[in-house]
Structure formats: structure tokens, C-alpha cells
Amino acid sequence: MGDREGETMDATGSETLTQGTSQLQRSPIQQGGSPPSKKTRSSPDPAPIARDAIKWIRHTMEEQATKRTGMTVELQRNMFDMLVKLDTAVHDLVMANLCCQSQLEEARRSTEVSVAAAVAQFGAELRMREAAHEHTLEAVVARYAEKEAIREAETKLVQVPAAQETDTQNTATFATVTRRKKNISSDRTGDRSRSRAAQRNKRIKEVKQAENLPSFVVKDCQGKSVTDVKNMIWNQVVAKKIRPRCQTVTTKAGKVILKPTDKETTDALKHIARVSPPVTRG
């Protein structure tokens, strides 16, 4: 754009951009006044306005740099108007950016809430389905067990009459079978009586020949129970490398009697009875 074209723009009070952009409208110029400081609302899309303002300012600065004279008052006012439009466009862009950021944050939060609600609902539905599945399995198992019990009962009922029929068929009647009395001779009875007498005499003889092993009584000690005393006695017997063979009898009065069944245990208890007062020979 040449000098003549710039002068035409200043004289008409409106500027036409050479890049095929839309025309920019400005307010009438007041004599001796300053450019308006109030920001007018830009078009819904501030990006083209800001782009056109930047191009116009750049073109004007390049054009004035080639001239020797300074900028005219009209051109300066037009420059201020373009700066105001650029400021308004930048402000609108910043506000739009903030609005987009807030919308994105709100969308993110709503998405998180929706996802959490969906997960909770899915978990609840899954638990309900698992519970229903468990109830169904329990019902199936119960029905199967009931059928098995009924089948076993029916099988037993069928088997019992068959067994009864078999028993009645195999059982002999008194009309066909007679019981015969066994012939027992008197000689055999005498032999049995003599053998019983011989066995009884043999047992009596063995009892008389057997050694009469003594018994021992466990007395109470001060500060110790009968069980503690008995355990102490068994520990002393085991310490002598003797395997104790003994019977323990507790009377109604609470007295504990030790009845050894072999000679080694008897000798050990005799020695303990001589040196230890809680055990006495019965």
C-alpha cells in the first residue's frame, strides 16, 4: 500500500485491509478528544479481529518508517482505535480461554462423578447377581439332596418287601422240619465236670503259689496335693530306670492306694517308703 493509498484511508475515516479480510468499523473522531477507553464487546469470534488489527498496525508502521514526516493526527487516532480493538479481542480471547478451561474442568469432574457412580452401580449389581447365583446354587443343591433322599427311601422300601419274601420262602416250617434231641452221654458229662474241677484247683494253686505283693498308701503333704505327691513318686521310680507297673485305686474317703504288679516296682516303692514319709506301706 503506497502513500496515496494511506492518505485516502486517513481522509475517508475508514480503512480497507488488502488481505481479503472484513472491514473494521470505528466511532467518529472527536476534535481534541482522546481515544475511548471503554472496551466495546467484540464479535463472537475475536480471533479475526485481532489478526486484522495486528496486520493493519504492522502495515502502518512499515509504511510510516519509509516516510520522512511524522504520523498525522488522524492516523494516530486510527492507530489508537486499532489498539483498543486489539486489546478487546485479546481480552475476549482470554475470557473465552478461561471459560473453556472451566468447562473442561467441570466436564472432567462430572465425568469422574459419573464414572464413580457407574462403578458403584456396577459393583452393587454384581454383588446382587452373585447373591442371586449363590441362592440359586443352594436351591439346586437342596433339590438334588431332596431327590436323592426320596430315591434312597424308595429304594429301601422296595428292598424290604423283597427281603421279607425271600425270608418267608427260605424259612422252614414245623410241618416239614422237626427238631431232634441230641444224644448226650453220661460219660461226657462226667468228663466235663472233672475238667472244670481240675481247672479250678489249678487256679487256686497258682494263686497260693503267687507272691503276695504289698500295697502302698499315698499321704497328703503340707503344701502339696495327692496328685503332686504321686507324680513325685513316679519320677523317683523312673529315675531308677524302672518301668513302673502299678495300679492306682482311690477310695471313697479320698485315699490313694498304689498296687504294684511286678517285683521291680514293689522294691522301688519299698525303698521310697523307707526314705520318704508321704508313702507308707499298706
Image (cartoon, rainbow, N blue to C red):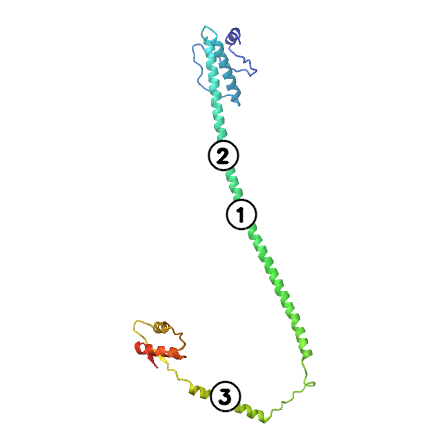
Give the answer, above or below, for where 235 lies relative to 88.
below
Give the answer, above or below, for where 273 lies relative to 146.
below
Residue 155 in sight in this render = yes
Query: 132 left or right of 243?
Result: right
The amino acid beneath tag 2 is Glu
Give the answer, above or below, for where 266 lies relative to 98.
below
Residue 138 position within the rendered picture, expressed as x and y whole percent measured from the top left:
57, 57
The amino acid beneath tag 3 is Gln
Query: 271 left or right of 131?
Result: left
**Nearer to the camera, 119 or 246:** 246
Query: 188 left or right of 254?
Result: right
Dot 2 or dot 1, earlier in sequence: 2
Camera-near label (2 vs 3) is: 3
Q: CA distance from mark 2 to mark 1?
A: 27 Å
The residue tagged 3 is 199
The amino acid beneath tag 1 is Ala
Q: How many marks?
A: 3
Q: CA distance from mark 3 to mark 1?
A: 86 Å
User: Residue shown at 64%/70% (left/top)?
Assistant: 157
Callout 3 environment at 10 Å: few (<14), some (14 to 19), or many (20+)? few
Residue 52 position within the rendered picture, expressed as x and y whole percent measured from the top left:
52, 17
Quarter holding the C terminus is: bottom left
Dot 3 or dot 1, earlier in sequence: 1
Mark number displayed over residue 106: 2
Q: CA distance from mark 2 to mark 3?
A: 110 Å
Give the answer, above or below, for where 116 lies relative to 143.
above
Does the CB distance between marks 2 and 1 fall below 8 Å? no
The residue tagged 1 is 124
Camera-near label (3 vs 1) is: 3
